[in-house]
Amino acid sequence: MYNIVSAIFLAENIKKIEIKAPRIAKKRKAGQFVMIRVSENGERIPLTIADSDPEKGTVTIIVQGMGKSTIELNGKEAGETIHDIVGPLGTPSHIEKFGTAVSIGGGVGTAIAYPTAVALKKAGNYVITINGARTKDLVILENEMKAVSDEAYITTDDGSYGFHGFVTQKLQELIDSGRTIDYVLAIGPIPMMRAVAEVTRPYGIPTVVSLNPVMVDGTGMCGGCRVTVENEIRFACVDGPEFDAHKVDFKNLSDRNRMYLGEERQSSETASHKCRIGHQQ
Amino acid sequence: MDPKPMTTKERLAIPRQAMPAQDPKERIHNFREVNLGYTPELAQQEAMRCIQCKDPVCIKGCPVNIKIDRFIKLVAEGNFLGAAKKIKEDNVLPAICGRVCPQEDQCEKVCVLTKKYTPVAIGNLERFVADYEREQGKIELPDVKPASGKKVAVIGSGPAGLSCANDLARLGHSVTVFEALHELGGVLMYGIPEFRLPKDIVKTEIEGMKKLGVKFVTNTVVGRSVTIDELMGEEHFDAIFIGVGAGLPWFMGIPGENLLGVYSANEFLTRVNLMKAYDFPRSDTPVFDCRGKNVAVFGGGNTAMDAVRTAKRLGAEHAYIVYRRSEAEMPARAEEIHNAKEEGIEFLLLMNPVEFTGNEEQWLTGVKCIRMELGEPDESGRRKPVPVKGSEFLLPVDMAVISIGNGSNPLIRQTTPDIEVSKRDTIVVDINTMATSKEAVYAGGDIVTGGATVILAMGAGRTAARAIHEKLTGTAPNFNEW
Ligand SMILES: Cc1cc2nc3c(=O)[nH]c(=O)nc-3n(C[C@H](O)[C@H](O)[C@H](O)COP(=O)(O)OP(=O)(O)OC[C@H]3O[C@@H](n4cnc5c(N)ncnc54)[C@H](O)[C@@H]3O)c2cc1C
Ligand code: SF4
Ligand code: FES
């Protein structure tokens, strides 16, 4: 059992949770993740480490309630516990002084991009961040991002805040303005990452994406997280989760991520059904 | 007065006692253990078949040299607890080994009765004795030597790690086992299914080790959460044993392997066993819904048999084993092949997949196979299968499980480069001590041999424990005193 030290909503359905896990807090580097099992019969779900405090011995994750497990996790408050957390897993982000680095986050992908943006800044890069959300209320980590960016942009699909449009449009604008961009990191929904890869491909800008396949163990043992990169099988939990965006087979990834859609629906329905019963009592 | 001792002739006249088992028609609908175990009467009857050879060759056939003749004698005499004690001098996990060892390739293969009659059912007896002891609640806590003040870290809680930890704890060392997963037991928990090895047995063994003082730390991936150098440095461990198994599933590298519905055996079995997907949605982890579907498992080892029989229990209409050699070359235990057939598993032998086919939505719909014939023996001594030109055909399947073996997980070697590894990425050791190229670091089990057996992993754990004890104290332990 691991203690939750703090838990606060950043936006509707998006919660920031700080968990006591000293070993992980001490070791983790930008780009790594943990596997969490919320309860006894829970799934093992991968979540990127958004931040850590080695002194306090805590790691922070940012969770959007989507399926049964993430909704259950989001229902947790400070003082409660989760059953299991293991990490840090995955290969840390490759960080160096590239020059001008653009970090792009879509939705909760912003939370995943944040630690890498911090590391890029520390390494002496000129950091531009572009963070997209559907609408103003879903914008997260705005101040944190500003603090690590030399330039920070927010985009909303509905124009309710910041730039009206997609992150890719903002990126294209930056490229068109003729400035040199040496490195792009894009994290978010698969269509967004794929679109960013297509924007940078013609210019040959090195672009990295963080992939989110279904995982079971997160240690390289099951092969369930396999992705196709340059026509080769790679295990995202060990070789990744970050890969060269121009070499990733996004279609295969989004296909494979559909594998349990039916079951997930069934599982969430049973969960929300239980909730409703709970409310009546 | 003692009854008159039986003559050899009388002993030889007793038939081998069959293992009582669940009816195949029934058991394909549940995950309960297939074998029900001997009764005391059956066990004694079987034990009487042993002619107590002057030179008990069976012992040499056992990788850990259990004193087979002596424990069987005790069974024949009805001293079951004494028999359990005798086995445990050499094997700490008899309830497990009695169930999963390939006896027909080991002790029972060389038993003198094998040539003319059928071998003594050594495995069944081992299982009986261990179960008897456990069910009577008579598992004695073994003596523990006074504390040595030395700290040993064991990495991985599979059979190799457990046996090493157990021995070292009894020798008085402070032992901490670090396990990557949330559950202890390695392949015994996440790989081998309940119907072959009930998880409660593994849990009881681990509880026993906790009572001996072994500390278990789950959710810790050595190489990621902490490195070997940190364990030896900041955390002051005097020695390390690496028993991390062979955990990196191989794929076949044929088209369509990433279609939806294609699994590695590790993933399929982990979902079902460790994550309890058979109980979905009460348990949150799903697995492909096999009900009424056709499932093909590629491979001929124990893992393949476990996967295909699991699919059948999950409701598969047709569950096939597709194997590129013939049945004689199958590495699986003979009993599992037999049980699989009884359960209606269909064996497609001398066949190899060449391509998976899928539908628009990328779900698996079939597998194109080619027929094989056996050619000249290869380096493993088995006749090499060669494809028969033009013999391709399409087997319609909805789910496929690839069970062709495992490579080694890279985490330890990447983070501890001074441990020498072979070309196959297994850890190189001195087989007499299990010492690696790194000072005070030992290794054993599948990470050294590549995918092998539970008993070999356990034996390696003990060899390492002996060497570690000698290194830490300067004296050799005597396990025979136990
Ligand atoms: C499905 C299946 C069926 C089998 N059936 C049989 C059978 O009938 N008979 C038989 O004799 N053999 C059988 N085997 C083979 C047998 O299980 C193995 O040979 C044996 O378990 C190897 O033991 P081990 O201790 O080396 O490794 P494992 O049992 O693999 O245990 C290794 C442990 O280390 C952990 N680990 C890995 N990396 C790390 C890390 N970096 N840090 C911390 N922990 C780590 C793993 O999570 C695991 O728990 C079977 C194997 C499988 C997969
Ligand atoms: S070889 Fe067979 S008959 Fe002889 S002692 Fe061993 S088990 Fe008994
Ligand atoms: S999640 Fe199992 S190998 Fe990556």
Image (cartoon, rainbow, N blue to C red):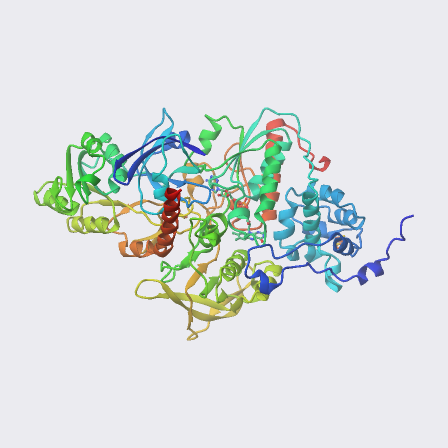
Q: Residue furthest bottom?
A: B390
Give percent across and percent down for residue B171. 64, 31
Question: Residue A93 vs residue A102: left or right?
Answer: right
Foreground: B110 or B308? B308
Question: What is the quadrant of residue B343 in the picture?
Answer: bottom right
Q: Is residue B461 visible?
A: no
Q: Measured along the vertical axis of the image, is residue B33 above or below residue B176?
A: below
Foreground: A195 or B108? A195
Question: Residue B475 vs residue A129: left or right?
Answer: right
Give percent across and percent down for residue B355. 38, 66
Residue drawn at x 48%, y 57% is B403
Give percent across and percent down for residue B349. 52, 68
Q: Residue furthest right?
A: B1
> Which quadrant of the rendered structure holds the C terminus of chain A?
top left
Q: Is residue B32 visible?
A: yes
Foreground: B408 or A47? A47
Question: Residue B4 vs residue B382: left or right?
Answer: right
Residue drawn at x 70%, y 60% is B18
Give percent across and percent down for residue A271. 38, 47
Q: Measured along the vertical axis of the image, is residue A92 above or below residue B132?
A: above
Residue drawn at x 63%, y 49% is B97
